[in-house]
C-alpha cells in the first residue's frame, strides 16, 4: 500500500442535533480518515453511518489521534 493520498471518498456524514450536516468523514486510499467541515462550526453530535471497528482499526496508523478519538466517540453513541 502507498502512503500517498491520491483518492478519497466520503464514508459518513457529521451532523448536529437538528439533523443539519456540519461535515463529512472521508477515507483516503491510505485508509487515513479526514474530516471536511462545512462552514466555520466544527461541532458534531452524531455520525451517519457510524464507522465500524474494522475501518477505525485500519485508519489508526495514518489518522491523527485526536481525529480518531473524536470519530470513535461519535461512532459509539
Image (spheres, rainbow, N blue to C red):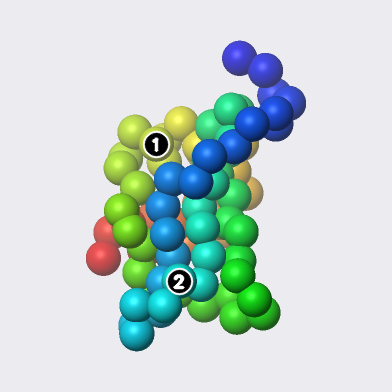
Q: Tell whether label 2 touches label 1 (CB within 8 Å).
A: no
Look at the image and tell me whether residue 70 can be seen.
yes
The structure residue drawn at horizontal position 59% and vertical position 75%, both measured from the top left corner, is 42
Q: Residues within 10 Å of mark 1 (few under 14, many from 20)?
A: few
The structure residue drawn at horizontal position 67% and vertical position 17%, both measured from the top left corner, is 2
Look at the image and tell me whether residue 73 can be seen.
no
Give residue 6's position: percent from left, percent from top: 70, 28
Give residue 17's position: percent from left, percent from top: 34, 83
Mark 2, secondary structure of its residue = strand
Mark 1, secondary structure of its residue = helix
Decide: is 38 above or below 54. below
Tell me how many marks there are.
2
Residue 18 or 72: which is nearer the viewer?
18
Q: In screen coordinates, is 21 left or right of 32? A: left
Q: In screen coordinates, is 58 left or right of 53? A: right
Location of the N terminus by quadrant is top right
Q: Residues within 10 Å of mark 2 (few under 14, many from 20)?
A: some
**Label whose residue precedes the other's in the sequence (1 or 2):** 2
Farthest residue to the bottom: give it. Answer: 18
The structure residue drawn at horizontal position 53% and vertical position 65%, both measured from the top left corner, is 23
Which of the 4 image quarters holds residue 5? top right
Give residue 77's position: percent from left, percent from top: 26, 65
Q: Which label number is shown at residue 38? A: none
Give residue 34's position: percent from left, percent from top: 59, 50
Decide: is 44 above or below 1. below
Query: What residue did someone put label 2 on?
Result: 21
Residue 35 or 39: which is nearer the viewer?
39
Query: What residue did someone put label 1 on?
Result: 55
Amino acid at each position: 500500500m502507498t502512503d500517498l493520498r491520491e483518492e478519497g471518498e466520503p464514508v459518513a456524514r457529521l451532523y448536529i442535533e437538528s439533523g443539519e450536516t456540519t461535515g463529512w468523514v472521508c477515507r483516503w486510499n491510505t485508509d487515513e480518515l479526514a474530516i471536511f467541515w462545512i462552514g466555520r462550526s466544527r461541532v458534531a453530535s452524531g455520525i451517519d453511518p457510524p464507522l465500524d471497528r474494522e475501518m477505525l482499526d485500519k485508519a489508526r496508523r495514518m489518522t491523527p489521534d485526536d481525529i480518531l478519538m473524536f470519530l470513535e466517540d461519535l461512532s459509539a453513541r
